[in-house]
């Protein structure tokens, strides 16, 4: 903030600067005409307005502040706090003030940085999840255009990893940018483990029926086919899970691991049309999605419905999300 100054003059300088104030002289002319004697002194106060004294009498008028350009070496500068002599109009913070300011900045940063980092990670998660959802949905649409109605797509009857791999090779991989295919291999670079939202570790055996492949953006796609003609709701269904940042940590449900499903044949109207990619639990109410069920998106559950919660909240991670 620019400090305004008022000049109080004694002796012969009073008339000169009074003329300057009322506009009869400019700054340069005032300096040429002013002759500072031993009895004269120039005092500059860090106030916007100040009363001017002439001799023993006080003038009851308020004078506007003069420009700081009038300050010259040797002038007496008086502030509300300190008195400085022989300054050249350079003002600075003291060491104590600098240290106090840095301390305050450090405390504020320590309080706000974790929140800022978490918000950034949430936005990255939503962007990556939406991209994976879009890419796989487009692949399913292209497969429909080439192979016809999803209810006619062939599925193996053994419900094992080989059946899942055959389905992926026929209906997904040709329409995606795949850089690595694991197929039935579950060892080496194709092994994978993840943690449920409640912290329970999930062994690779739980993924034994999933075939896996890696997209060009690093996303890992897990595919498992299930063919059960006697099933009440889904005689034919494909489970498709994604890890949006590949093999990087945390490999945790609801953080970077999300679950989807595709109904190829269903007896429920809510899951039609068939062949559409749906998040697990997408047809459930928000209360069920965030409830206490084993698949709910809550800290005490597995987190299978977390993709559904993000989609339900218009592709955002809300404050209620168990991040």
Image (cartoon, rainbow, N blue to C red):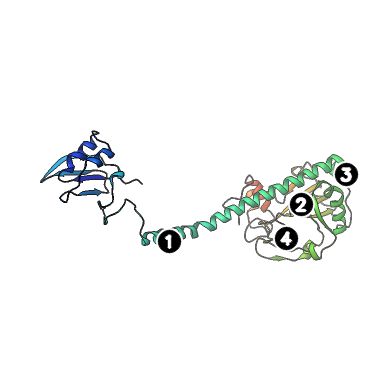
Foreground of the two, 301 or 56: 56
> How far apart in space, not on screen, are marks 3 and 1 (Cα)?
68 Å
SS at mark 1? helix
Residue 148 visible in the shown view: no
Q: Is residue 4 left or right of residue 218?
A: left
Question: Which residue is label 2 attached to?
Answer: 216
Question: Residue 16, percent across and down?
Answer: 20, 39
Closer to the chain start, of discs 2 and 3, is 3
Q: Which of labels 4 and 2 is toward the front?
A: 2
Q: Is residue 151 left or right of residue 303?
A: right
Numbered mark located on residue 103 in the image: 1
Question: Residue 225, percent across and down?
Answer: 83, 54
* Quarter of the image where one finds residue 29: top left
Foreground of the two, 146 or 175: 175
Q: Which of labels 3 and 4 is toward the front?
A: 4
Q: Which of labels 1 and 4 is toward the front?
A: 1
Question: Which residue is label 4 attached to?
Answer: 247
Closer to the chain start, of discs 3 and 4, is 3
Above or below, 258 against 141 in this view is: below
Q: Residue at left 61%, top 52%?
A: 122
Neighbor class of circle 3 (other Cα within 10 Å; few <14, some 14-19, many 20+) is few
Question: Residue 73, percent across and down?
Answer: 28, 51
Closer to the chain start, of discs 1 and 4, is 1
SS at mark 4? loop
Question: Which residue is label 3 attached to?
Answer: 152
Neighbor class of circle 4 (other Cα within 10 Å; few <14, some 14-19, many 20+) is some
> How far apart in space, not on screen, are marks 4 and 2 (Cα)?
13 Å
């Amino acid at each position: 903030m620019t400090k305004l100054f008022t000049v109080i003059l004694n002796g012969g300088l009073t008339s000169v600067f009074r003329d300057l104030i009322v506009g009869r002289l400019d700054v340069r002319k005032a300096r040429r005409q002013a002759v500072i004697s031993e009895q004269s002194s120039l005092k500059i106060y860090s106030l916007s307005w100040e009363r001017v004294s002439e001799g023993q009498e006080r003038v009851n008028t308020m004078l506007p502040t003069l420009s700081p350009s009038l300050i010259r070496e040797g002038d007496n500068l008086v502030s509300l706090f300190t008195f400085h002599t022989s300054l050249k109009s350079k003002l600075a913070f003291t060491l104590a003030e600098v240290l106090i300011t840095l301390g305050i900045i450090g405390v504020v940063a320590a309080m706000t940085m974790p929140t800022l980092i978490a918000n950034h990670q949430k936005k990255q998660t939503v962007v990556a999840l939406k991209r994976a959802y879009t890419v796989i949905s487009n692949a399913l649409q292209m497969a429909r255009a080439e192979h016809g109605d999803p209810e006619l797509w062939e599925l193996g009857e053994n419900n094992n990893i080989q059946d899942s791999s055959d389905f992926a090779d026929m209906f997904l991989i040709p329409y995606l940018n795949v850089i690595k295919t694991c197929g039935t291999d579950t060892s080496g670079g194709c092994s994978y483990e993840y943690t449920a939202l409640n912290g329970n570790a999930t062994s690779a055996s739980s993924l034994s029926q999933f075939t896996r492949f890696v997209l060009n953006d690093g996303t890992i796609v897990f595919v498992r086919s299930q063919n059960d003609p006697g099933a009440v709701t889904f005689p034919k269904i494909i489970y498709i899970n994604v890890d949006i940042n590949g093999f990087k940590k945390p490999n945790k449900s609801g953080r970077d691991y999300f679950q989807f499903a595709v109904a190829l044949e269903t007896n429920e109207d809510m899951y039609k049309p068939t062949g559409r990619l749906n998040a697990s639990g997408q047809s459930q109410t928000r209360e069920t999605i965030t409830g206490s069920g084993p698949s709910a998106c809550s800290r005490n559950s597995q987190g299978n419905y977390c993709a559904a919660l993000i989609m339900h909240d218009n592709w955002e991670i809300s404050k209620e999300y168990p991040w």
